[in-house]
Amino acid sequence: MIDSHCHLTDPRLFDQIDAVLARAAKAGVTAMVTIGTEIADDHLALEVAGRYSDRVRCALGIHPNHCQNTGIEDIDALSMLAADDLCVAIGETGLDYFHTRADRKKQQQFFEAQLALAVRYDKPVVIHSREAVTDTLAILGTFPTVRCVFHCFTGTAKEAEAIIEANALIGFTGPITYKDNNDLRKVVDAVPLDRLLVETDSPYLSPEPVRTTKICEPAFVAHTLAIVAQVKGRSVAEIDQITRETTKAFYGMTIG
Ligand SMILES: [Zn+2]
């Protein structure tokens, strides 16, 4: 399995990283992509990918919730880091209209600058989009060559359809395992298998059955993958193989 999106640099995971990686290996997780959210975090994410290069790659970006107190010159710093081969994508970046930590104009400015970086380095983009799918797709439309994944999708069937139509991938996390999320499982069912990634977004969003008892970590991607298999009526091994190939192709990754 591959955890296509986690935050190994978050102190909740970083402070016990060797144990976290050991548990991931034991659960059958062969690769992880750790996602940076601001420049200091991006530095650390790159360092983690370097230290565990047999199984970790990174995506580097400035999260929409972290751009308010960031100058646009940070894009230059990001650009230097993102040139590294261990950086397999730009992000996470995008638009968050649910939280209000940065005004919309500023979020859009940082999103566009990072999409331009993706074009420059020919790397895919990890998109964070919260209550902002329409605007996110409109901006993406002005960068037609950029490949992207809408990570941690929890939106509607209609939104998923628009994302698939725009040629993007959709990443699913722990919430597809929650008992009351039947509508989201219907979305999983509707998304073509070759357009779907599994992820933890750890340390956030622990899946069932550890939802309320454990901090999320990459090993738990197995629970999310099992639900995808159940919804699709396929075996875990099949879903693992298909999502692994999609993830590796998307990130241009040789590990996993
Ligand atoms: Zn994330």
Image (cartoon, rainbow, N blue to C red):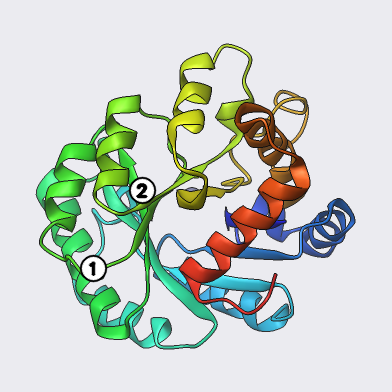
* Callout 2–callout 1 Cβ contact below 8 Å: no
Q: 162 and 72: which one is in front?
A: 162
Left or right side of 75 for 186: right
Q: Kindly identify which residue carries mark 2.
A: 128
Residue on which disc 1 sits? 115
What's the residue at 12%, 49% (across, down)?
A: 138
Residue beneath the point at 63% across and 79% down: 254
Q: Position of residue 249 (x, y in %)?
A: 51, 70
Amino acid on which the number 2 mark rests in the picture? His
Give the quarter of the figure containing the C terminus: bottom right
The residue at label 2 has a CB less than 8 Å from ligand 1 = yes
Q: Is residue 138 left or right of residue 47?
A: left
Please name whichever residue, 167 or 79, is drawn nearer the observer in this view of the structure: 167
Counting from the top left corner in percent of width and height, residue 26 is at 90, 56
Q: Farthest residue in the top direction?
A: 180
Secondary structure of residue under mark 2: strand
Q: Residue 230: which quarter of the image?
A: top right
The amino acid type, in three-letter code, at marker 1 is: Leu
